[in-house]
């Protein structure tokens, strides 16, 4: 496609909002808007005018792309994201591999195995509630059955019948996530380009939204569903074998379930099989049979447990359940250690100065994901046990309470959280003086002649800058939490020794057991409070835009990346947003317009990804304006293999360096891209890269203007599109678009004229022949 040089030079300013979403009328700063493309989840809007002319006085047509409902949607779906948070973090970890060559395959394998462990933990937690607490303990206790008519009908039945009936609960739970994972979050097929369906994903930002993840998701989903059923089968067979029924049929079924788990693990490490974009191969047919095989094996296990004639031994807990949970926790811990050692080795092999999380994001975020999954699973079992044990004595609680391995897990999680909070407090205190001095120096340079009447406002600006600088201190804090949780999770193994935390600690220290038991109860309620808080926060985030700003950072960052590690993670909204933006920009350019892309926060990441996918003839009529952009501050640190200096340079080259990035010292999320220089200072980057970043004076002044009653606001991360600094940058880029593209178009047109080359003389054109 070639755009004729005589095409009209109108400019469309396409604005894309950032984290937590925004209404179209707020983005466009217009009370009435109309939708011109898209739907309610992701749509394009323009100011509504009776004369059907949405252009501003400078000839720029405003347009907004609203994608805020893609990662959240309904309130119920937003709340469900809370319970999928460990899966989402594990999926984000697979994209955090180091930039060094040869590290991708190992990180992908370990992240996918960690994701499989999360699925096993999910299955075992439901097994712990349904089979251990209810079928094995409560249904065998007259005290527990008292007043519970919904359980008493199974009381006194044979253990095999109780286990087979209650096993329908984990089967239903697995079927639920199977059903939810099979339903796409949005219909993205219509947004895939014809050339991208068979394209192999490239190891950079352009991979997002450029390839069809449906076949890969189908393979991951089949493997995880099969592993979930196999995990439940192993727990049932372990109970049958450990309770005095170790027959030949039990051994055969156990070997079959173990082989199924080994096959699932091996397939996850076979990246050419999992990552291949083309469906319909022989391996896909084998993988698609795994859920059916696991379901058939589960039916055989149910029949064996129900009809096996061997007697069941009397034990205080479901036999073999504790070792099953411990094996998963030990495997997860070992994988985290290997992943961390590999990341440290790759980091040391790559010379240069590193940010704390550069190259370490995968093991750190994976540790957070596993920690939350263990805490949620342990607290689910612990809270249900506490509900069933109401009115029980201490001796009865020991017999019918939760497995000790979960008690140790809650204790370890509490220690990790408390230690992380202590570390955060110490870091805040120790860095306060340094941050305050740096903030005071910045304010002194920005407002050297501020009168004494502005002292209070100056203190507010200094505090805002000091708070924004604490973002860099969060990275070592997350690393510290990951290490502390890894140490805390290893304490779960003590549960196999049948030692309670209170008993073990009081035996070797002077800390009373009652205090330890109180801490465990506190840790359980703390975990439950976190879950309830996130769920309530999800509801308020959906209903309240102001609160959604803070919660939306987690969702928008985690759901930006395709599901390459765990199929039960929330769907990737970029798989629709990026192709949709690409199509809309191409349409506007083909219609004879220039396009000025203005992206705030996460919207700047979407636009940078989109620019990498624009054809060259489209990109040469596009300019880019970013503000509050996390490309350098967050993405380059967390995802160095996909967002780095080379990728950012390529984005700028695609738009021929028509890129302006606005940043300020009060921003907690966004920052500079190429050069952190301030106004009046020489840029740190050479060439055109030095002209991209422009530092904003925030606030514009510390005194009350003559036409106002309060001083200018401190925007921080939330710069408004109506601000004069934003509009000035937008007008400059729009003018550059008109002038540079007109000049290029004129030169191309002169070269195509007959009669030889043309030269310009005093503003006129003459033939050199």
Image (spheres, helix red, strand yellow):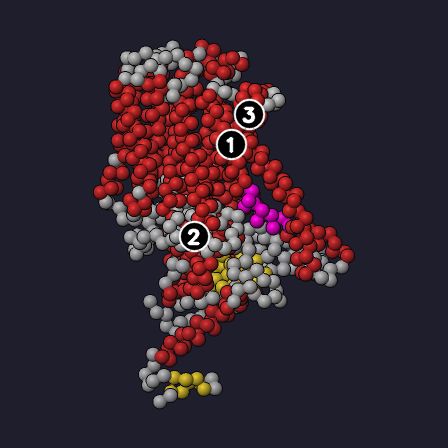
Badge 3 element: helix
Decide: marks 3, 2 in contact (CB < 8 A)? no
Q: How busy is the neighbourhood of tag 3: few (under 14 within 10 Å), some, or many (20 plus)?
A: many
Mark 2 is surrounded, within 10 Å at the Cα level, by few (under 14), some (14 to 19) or many (20 or more) other residues, namely: many
Q: Is residue 512 left or right of residue 46?
A: right
Q: Is residue 465 above or below residue 660?
A: above
Q: Quadrant of residue 150?
A: top left
Q: What is the residue that sits farthest to the left in this orientation? A: 282
Q: Are marks 2 and 1 in contact (CB under 8 Å)?
A: no
x, y percentage for residue 396? 50, 13
- Asked whether 591 or 213 is in front, the reply is 213
Asked if one can make out residue 597 in the rendered structure from this viewpoint, the answer is yes
Residue bearing mark 2:
99
Q: Where does the N terminus fall, quadrant-wise? A: bottom left
Residue at 47% over, 15% down: 399
Q: Which mark is residue 663?
A: none
- Is 399 contained in the magenta span? no
Q: Secondary structure at mark 2?
A: loop
Q: Which residue is mark 1?
A: 488
Question: Is the magenta region chiefly helix, strand or loop?
Answer: helix
Of the 4 image quadrants, the one containing the C terminus is bottom left
Under circle 1, the secondary element is: helix
Q: Which residues are magenta?
A: 466-478
Mark found first going from the N terminus, 1 or 3: 1
Q: Nearer the viewer, mark 3 or mark 2?
A: 2
Q: CA distance from mark 3 to mark 2?
A: 41 Å
């Amino acid at each position: 496609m070639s755009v004729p040089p005589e095409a009209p030079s109108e400019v469309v300013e396409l604005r894309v909002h950032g984290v937590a979403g925004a209404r179209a009328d707020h983005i466009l700063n217009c009370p009435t808007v109309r939708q011109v493309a898209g739907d309610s989840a992701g749509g394009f809007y323009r100011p509504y005018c009776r004369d059907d002319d949405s252009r501003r006085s400078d000839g720029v047509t405003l347009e907004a792309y609203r994608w805020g409902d893609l990662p959240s949607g309904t309130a119920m779906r937003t709340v469900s994201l809370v319970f999928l948070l460990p899966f989402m973090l594990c999926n984000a970890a697979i994209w955090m591999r180091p930039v060094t060559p040869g590290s991708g395959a190992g990180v992908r394998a370990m992240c996918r195995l960690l994701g499989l462990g999360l699925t096993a933990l999910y299955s075992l937690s439901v097994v712990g509630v349904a089979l251990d607490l209810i079928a094995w303990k409560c249904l065998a206790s007259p005290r527990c059955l008292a007043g519970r008519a919904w359980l008493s009908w199974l009381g006194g039945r044979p253990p095999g019948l109780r286990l087979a009936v209650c096993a329908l609960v984990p089967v239903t739970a697995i079927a639920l996530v199977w059903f939810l994972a099979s339903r796409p979050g949005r219909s993205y097929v219509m947004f895939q380009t014809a050339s991208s369906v068979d394209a192999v994903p490239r190891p950079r930002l352009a991979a997002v939204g450029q390839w069809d993840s449906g076949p890969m998701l189908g393979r991951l989903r089949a493997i995880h569903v099969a592993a979930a059923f196999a995990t439940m089968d192993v727990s049932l067979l372990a109970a049958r074998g450990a309770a005095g029924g170790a027959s030949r049929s039990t051994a055969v079924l156990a070997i079959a379930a173990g082989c199924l788990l080994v096959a699932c693990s091996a397939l996850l490490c076979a990246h050419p099989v999992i990552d291949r974009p083309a469906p319909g191969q022989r391996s896909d047919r084998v993988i698609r049979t795994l859920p059916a095989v696991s379901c058939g094996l589960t039916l055989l296990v149910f029949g064996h447990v129900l009809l096996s004639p061997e007697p069941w031994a009397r034990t205080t807990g479901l036999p073999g359940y504790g070792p099953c949970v411990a094996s998963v926790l030990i495997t997860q811990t070992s994988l985290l250690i290997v992943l961390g050692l590999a990341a440290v080795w790759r980091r040391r092999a790559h010379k240069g100065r590193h940010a704390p999380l550069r190259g370490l994001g995968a093991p750190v975020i994976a540790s957070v994901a596993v920690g939350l999954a263990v805490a949620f699973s342990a607290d689910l079992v612990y809270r249900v046990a506490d509900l069933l044990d109401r009115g029980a004595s201490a001796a009865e609680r020991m017999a019918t309470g939760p497995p000790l391995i979960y008690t140790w897990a809650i204790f370890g999680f509490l220690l990790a959280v408390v230690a992380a909070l202590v570390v955060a407090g110490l870091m805040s205190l120790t860095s306060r003086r340094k941050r305050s001095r740096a903030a005071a120096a910045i304010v002194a340079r920005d407002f050297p002649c501020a009168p004494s009447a502005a002292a209070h406002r100056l203190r507010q600006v200094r505090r805002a800058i000091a708070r924004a600088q604490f973002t860099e201190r969060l990275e070592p804090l997350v690393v510290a939490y990951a290490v502390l949780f890894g140490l805390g999770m290893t304490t779960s193994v003590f549960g196999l020794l049948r030692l309670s935390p209170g008993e073990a600690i009081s035996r070797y220290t002077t800390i009373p057991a009652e205090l330890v038991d109180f801490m465990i109860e506190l840790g359980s309620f703390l975990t439950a409070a976190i879950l309830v808080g996130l769920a309530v926060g999800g509801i308020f985030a959906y209903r309240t835009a102001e609160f959604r700003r803070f919660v939306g950072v987690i969702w928008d960052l985690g759901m930006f990346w395709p599901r390459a590690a765990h199929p039960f993670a929330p769907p990737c909204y970029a798989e629709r947003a990026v192709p949709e933006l690409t199509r809309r920009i191409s349409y506007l350019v083909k219609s004879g317009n220039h396009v000025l892309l203005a992206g705030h926060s996460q919207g700047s990441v979407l636009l940078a990804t989109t620019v990498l996918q624009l054809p060259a003839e489209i990109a040469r009529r596009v300019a880019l304006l970013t503000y509050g952009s996390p490309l350098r501050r967050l993405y380059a640190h967390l995802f160095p293999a996909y967002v780095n200096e080379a990728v950012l340079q390529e984005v700028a080259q695609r738009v021929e360096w028509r890129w302006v990035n606005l940043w300020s010292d009060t921003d907690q999320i966004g920052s500079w891209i190429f050069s952190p220089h301030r106004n009046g200072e020489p840029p740190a980057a050479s060439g055109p890269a030095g002209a991209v970043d422009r530092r904003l004076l925030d606030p514009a002044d510390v005194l009350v203007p003559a036409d106002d009653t309060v001083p200018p606001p401190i925007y921080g991360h939330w710069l408004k599109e109506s601000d004069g600094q934003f509009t000035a940058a937008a007008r400059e880029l729009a003018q550059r678009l008109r002038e540079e593209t007109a000049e290029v178009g004129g030169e191309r047109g002169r070269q195509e004229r007959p009669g030889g080359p043309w030269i310009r003389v005093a503003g006129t054109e003459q033939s050199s022949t």
